[in-house]
Amino acid sequence: MTSKPKPGLIVDELRKNFASGVTLDFEFRKQQLKAIYNLIEENRSDICDALYKDLHKNETEAWFSEIDVVVFEIGSLLENMDNWLKPEVPDTSTQPAFMNSKFEIVKAPQGVVTMISPWNYPVRLVLAPLAGAIAAGNVVVIKQSQISAHTSALLTNLLSKYMDNRVVKLVNGAIEETTVLLKQQVDHMFFTGSGMVGKIVAQAAASQLCRLTLELGGKCPVIITNLAESKAKLDIIARRLVWGKLLNCGQTCLASDYVLVDKDIHNDLILSIKKAILEFYSSNPKNSADYGRIISSSHFERIKSLVEKSNADMVIGNLEEWDINDLYIPPTVMDNAKPDDSLMSDELFAPVLPIMQISSSQDAIEFINSRNLPLAIYLFTDDSNVRSAITSRTRSGSIVYEDTMIHAGCNNIPFGGFGHSGAGSYMGKYSILNFSHQRNVMTNSLNFPPKKLDALRLPPYTGNDYAWKKFTS
């Protein structure tokens, strides 16, 4: 008899543990959330070291973009989960047939959740959704990325040490292990990563008819248009744009992917971008402690190939400075990009910024709508009519005015995409909703409905047409 693959055994064990009812106790869930908190606080230094080895991520950047986001999320869940998980009582008073019935909408755990996490934020994108799934009462099997090897190895050890292994287990490996895991019957698949792999996960979820959350990406545009006193504001805009682009060396699903800027301020914007890069990373970003690295040589080669094929003008950066041995790509700005340019097809995930000129906000709307839906749109404008038009006439996971990417740190709003940028959302109470089944619970009495109503609703129906209409009117 052929033995079951390891992922199958893990899922079977988790399902038995869930059936035991261990996660129904709110205090048990809170203990597990506190365990994640302790995991972080007692191992900050080791976590930062692992992130530096994988991504050359600065310690301060690791704290605010990975670690503390999870700390805040856990604090919010601990403080609010009792309230968020309370049954809701719907108003059914408008329907006479249900006036004496009792209804509750209970947020029930879904069961076994498969989580597949990426390499670019290998702490945050494991622990934040894990916290939400645990708070909602589920058991979880996690498949981390093998590409962020140091961080994944550390979290494997720490999760096994801190968490109750009845409710959290890990599957390590690469494509083969992921393929086997996706064949296991679960109740929810939660995937963060590329659209290409997202489609594979979606097919697996469809074959099982299980819940699905896809946290994908896309080409997030920055629109700079209709600015009053534009030159005075461009330095601020450029600083926020460069920060959102070069955080984690451009390897962020919410990063500013390309810029659509009014022709009359285009040249001034490039000067402001140069100034911001110099301010943030000095004249030699390679030696800056704050500038990251590309995750692997294969990703380096992918980015280099796109830039070499591009017909845009490299106005910031120099290919001679690219260093595959150090996985270093300098901040690079490609001006006068065309819609069909190699840099304008897929999400770049790189410290490379294409710039396109527009004549009006209408140009921006038409261009964005001709592409796959982005995870975010970033808009800088002084015109309230432009804000209204872009908000109402485009679609995206989110839209941010006068900034880039900062909204990802807020755990009181739903984080998620739409269309090609994802499906479903999480963080804070939205994690509770995402990882719960909203179950209707109805209670009737044998003393109600009265005989008159029973007579109306039970066969034979002949002759009851008028009486039923009169009762319900």
Image (tube, rainbow, N blue to C red):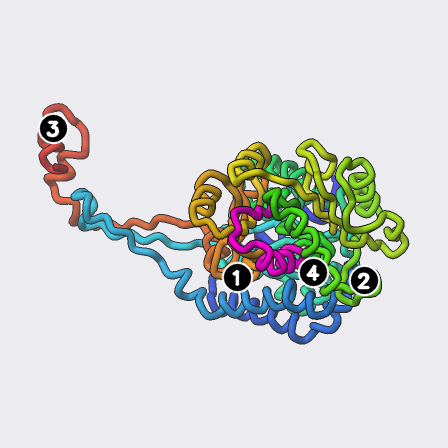
Q: Do the residues labelled 1 and 4 touch (CB within 8 Å)?
A: no
Hey, what amino acid is under mark 1? Cys
Q: Is residue 146 visible?
A: no
Q: How crowded is mark 3: few (under 14 residues within 10 Å), some or many (20 or more)?
A: some
Identify which residue is drawn at 80% across, 35% down: 309
Frontmost residue, 384 versus 155: 384
Q: Do the residues labelled 3 and 1 touch (CB within 8 Å)?
A: no
Q: Determine which residue is flagged by label 1.
A: 410
* Distance between the alpha carbons at the discs numbered 2 and 1: 33 Å
Hey, what amino acid is under mark 3? Asn
Q: Determine which residue is flagged by label 4.
A: 276
Q: Give the percent coordinates (x, y) of residue 137.
A: 50, 59
Hey, what amino acid is under mark 2? Ser
Label placed on residue 464? 3
Identify whether 74 is placed above or below 352: below
Q: Are marks 3 and 2 in contact (CB under 8 Å)?
A: no
Badge 4 marks a residue whose secondary structure is helix
Which label's residue is closer to the chain start, 3 or 2?
A: 2
